Image (cartoon, rainbow, N blue to C red):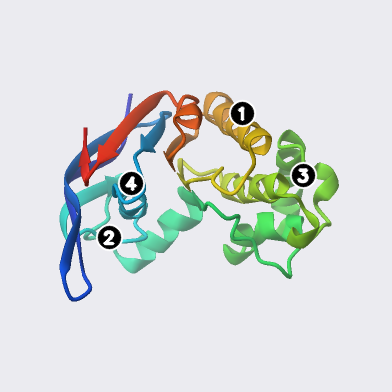
Amino acid sequence: MEILLKAQGITKTFDTGAKTEVLKGVDLTVEDGEFVAIVGESGSGKSTLLYILAGIDTPTSGEVVLAGQNLATVSDDDMASLRRHDVAFVYQYDNLVPHLNAYENITLPLVLDKQKESEFKERVVALATELGIADRLKNYPNELSGGEQQRVAIARALAINPKVIFLDEPTGSLDRERGRQVMEILKEVNEKRGVTLIMVTHSLTHAGYASRRIEIEDGRIK
């Protein structure tokens, strides 16, 4: 299998008057097509690690190579291209734009990429049908349930046909049943579409949907 992501020697120290070392030399390799769950208690460093792997945050030291790009040396233009075409992120809270309906939220990254609606409308509707929200595309976020909002967020991530989706506690704001439904969708996305998923979760049950589980404790992988 092709290596999609390789992180070496990742450290992260926050200085808020007193220095706090959150990550302490993390090495991690993810192959194309994997579904990896990173689990750990609150404060273990798992979300910080996820943001660094996705290129949203920078490490204090160490190196991340993602989809062939060294995130420490990649140009701003190449990083922007990576985010438009290869890398998507799903947050714990759906992070939808409140004044856009579901369809507009899903297609937002495509519009920002200056793609024509005639080129993506049919594909987006098919994607919404696959995720069970085709009848909710005209609804605004405040008219959707928490589970529907998260499905819209997942659809928005999938709309760019990414190589990898990073997910930060994607079921953290949902009840047990809606959380289970979202995890079933993610497992299907990974198995049927072959999209690499890297997910942070505190739930061992939800981590069980992944093909590989990584435990982090006190800033180190166990």
Instruction: Name the residue carrying label 1.
Output: 184
Most foreground residue, 221 or 70: 221
Which kind of residue does numbered mark 2 sit on?
A: Val
118 w.r.t. 134: above or below: below
- Find out whether the residues at labels 1 and 4 contact each other: C-beta distance under 8 Å: no
C-alpha span from label 2 to label 4: 24 Å
Mark 1 or mark 3, earlier in chain: 3
For residue 170, say whether it is visible: yes
Residue sticking out furthest to the bottom: 17
Helix, strand or loop status at disc 3: helix
Helix, strand or loop status at disc 1: helix
The x and y percentages for residue 17 are 18, 76
Which kind of residue does numbered mark 1 sit on?
A: Glu
* In this picture, residue 1 sits left or right of residue 18: right
The x and y percentages for residue 182 are 62, 36
Instruction: Name the residue carrying label 3.
Output: 125
